Amino acid sequence: MATTGFTGHFVAMARNNIWANHRLLSACMALSPAEFAAARTSFFPSLRATLNHNLWVDTYYIDALERDPTVLDRYDDPPPDFADAASLHQAQIASDRRLLAFCERQTEDLLAKGLVLPRPNRTPPPTSVASILEHLLQHQTHHRGQAHAMLAGTQVKPPQLDEFFLAGEEHLRRDELRALGLPVT
C-alpha cells in the first residue's frame, strides 16, 4: 500500500499504531490479570492503568475528530477498565480501526480544517485536524514506550516495536498485518 503525501503519512502512522498496539498487547496477554495490574514504576502505576488510559484518550479524541456532539458528555466517563490484556486488546484494536478509517477518509483540505476540542470548563482555540492526529499518535507512542519499559520488568520479553517502516524488514511484520486484516507491502 503506497502512502504518499500528508494524508498518506497519517494512514501509515495509523497502520503502525494498530500494529504496535497489537504487538504490545499480545505480549501483555502472557501476563496474568494480577501481573497486568501489578504496581510498577512509570507515570501510571501499572501496565493495566497505562494501557487503559491510552484507550480512554483514543476514544475521546476519535469521537472529537468525528465531531460527535456527545463527546463532552463522556469526558469524565472513561470506557470500561479492562482487567486483562486480552479484553483490552480487542477494544484497543477496534479503536485503532476507527482511527485508521478516519485517517483514510482525510484529504489535505480536511486535515487543515480547524476543530475545537471540547473541554468541560473552557473553550480552547481551534486546532487543525492534522495537529490533533499528530498529538494523538504521539500520545500513543509515549505511553506505549512506558508500557514497554514496564513489561521489561516481567518474565515477558517486550516486543520489537520500531521496524514498521523500514524496507527489508517487512517480513518482521507481514504475518501480524495479515492477521489484523491490513494490506501487506
Image: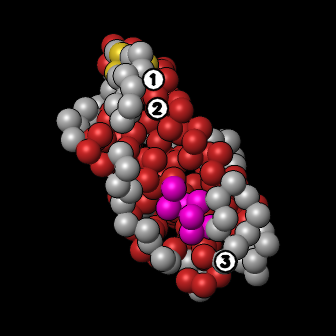
| Mark found first going from the N terminus, 3 or 1 | 3
Q: Secondary structure at mark 2?
A: helix
Q: Are marks 1 and 2 in contact (CB under 8 Å)?
A: yes
- Judge whether residue 112 is colored magenta: no
State the residue position of label 2: 133
- Residue 184 shown left or right of residue 111 in the figure: right
Q: Kindly identify the amino acid type of the residue bearing the numbered disc 1.
A: Ala
The percent coordinates of residue 154 (x first, y second) are 75, 77
Q: Kindly identify the amino acid type of the residue bearing the numbered disc 2.
A: Leu
Q: Secondary structure at mark 1?
A: helix
State the residue position of label 3: 38
Residue 174 versus residue 56: which sits nearer the camera? 56
Residue 130's disc number: 1
Distance between the alpha carbons at the discs numbered 1 and 2: 5 Å
Q: Which residues are magenta?
A: 47-53
Colouring method of the image: secondary structure
Is 45 located above or below residue 56 in the figure? below
Quarter holding the N terminus is: top left
